[in-house]
Amino acid sequence: MKFIQNTMAKTLALMLCATMTAATAQAGPLADRLEAGEPIRLGFAAAPPWAYAGEDGSAKGFVNDITIEILERMGHTNIEPVLTDWAGLIPSLIASRVDIVTGGMYILPARCENMDFSEPIGVFGDAFVVPSGNPKGISTYQDLIDQDLIMVSPSGYNTIADAKAAGVPAGNIMEVPGTTEMLAAVRAGRADAGATNALEAQRVQSMSDAVEMTDPLAFPAESRTPVGVGFHPEDDAFREEFNAALAEYLGSDEMMEKVASENYIATFLPDGQTTAEACKAD
């Protein structure tokens, strides 16, 4: 009888251990950190108005505003901002140096292979930053090709791959760390046009009378791409909870009032676009 009891006890212990292990695996690394009382590390690059660090190091920008509000609605207030280079955001997430990636991260198939996205928080297009008066008449990638011009763009931006796909020679594409360096290259004449998203182009235009922004509508319609918040592939349960809270908040009066100062307007709200569709796009 004692042998049977001992055997049953060991069996129950093994079953409990297996159940706990399975639950932990399903929960994901972020859930483990939260259970341990550790902060949610919010990774972003300096890319106003999407995301940037305030003077006190806090997370600013409309993507951070939306993300932090959603996290607080989920009951998470212990949030640690982590500022890094744009090109280092996805590697930092994969290496678990950050838990969530914000900024103007377009939902692209290549990125979907490395991380998971929330449902879209907005849909945005691209534009060029060119010298004032646009003396070379640049509106499209084809204009760059026809005149054998030099384009500059921050490393990791979709505009680099888009330009190559359109036929811009790789040797005519300059990569720089961020939009400040992009502006400097155009102003100094090292590049004929800076390619970035329309929101950043609008901000860069406001920074200098020496440049202007081209018409975003001149870009192909397919350049309008959904933007989402990035999660580690093992954090499915947390991401799904985030999406549920996002669905209630997105487009609300409260949200639109909060992000108005960062130039997010109702035009940018998703209109039926989904992350699943964006991840499968050609």
Image: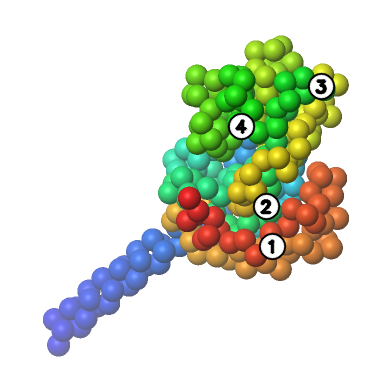
Q: Nearer the viewer, mark 1 or mark 4?
A: 4
Question: Tag 1: residue type?
Answer: Asp
Q: Position of residue 7 (x, y in %)?
A: 17, 78
Q: What residue would you read off at disc 1?
A: 271
Judge from the rendering whether residue 95 lies leftward or rightward of residue 56; answer left or right: left
Q: Nearer the viewer, mark 4 or mark 3?
A: 4
Q: Sequence-wise, which precedes: disc 3 or disc 2? A: 2
Q: Compute the Cα span from label 3 to label 2.
A: 27 Å
Q: Position of residue 76 (x, y in %)?
A: 65, 57
Q: Please tell me whether mark 4 sits on a helix, a strand or a loop.
A: helix
Residue ranking furthest to the front: 146
Question: Tag 2: residue type?
Answer: Val
Q: In which quadrant of the rendered view does residue 58 lie?
A: top right
Of 192 and 237, nearer the camera is 192
Q: Sequence-wise, which precedes: disc 4 or disc 3? A: 3
Tag 1 near tag 2, CB within 8 Å: yes
Q: What residue would you read off at disc 3?
A: 132
Q: Position of residue 247 (x, y in %)?
A: 67, 66
Q: Which mark is residue 141?
A: 4
Q: Please tell me whether mark 1 sits on a helix, a strand or a loop.
A: loop
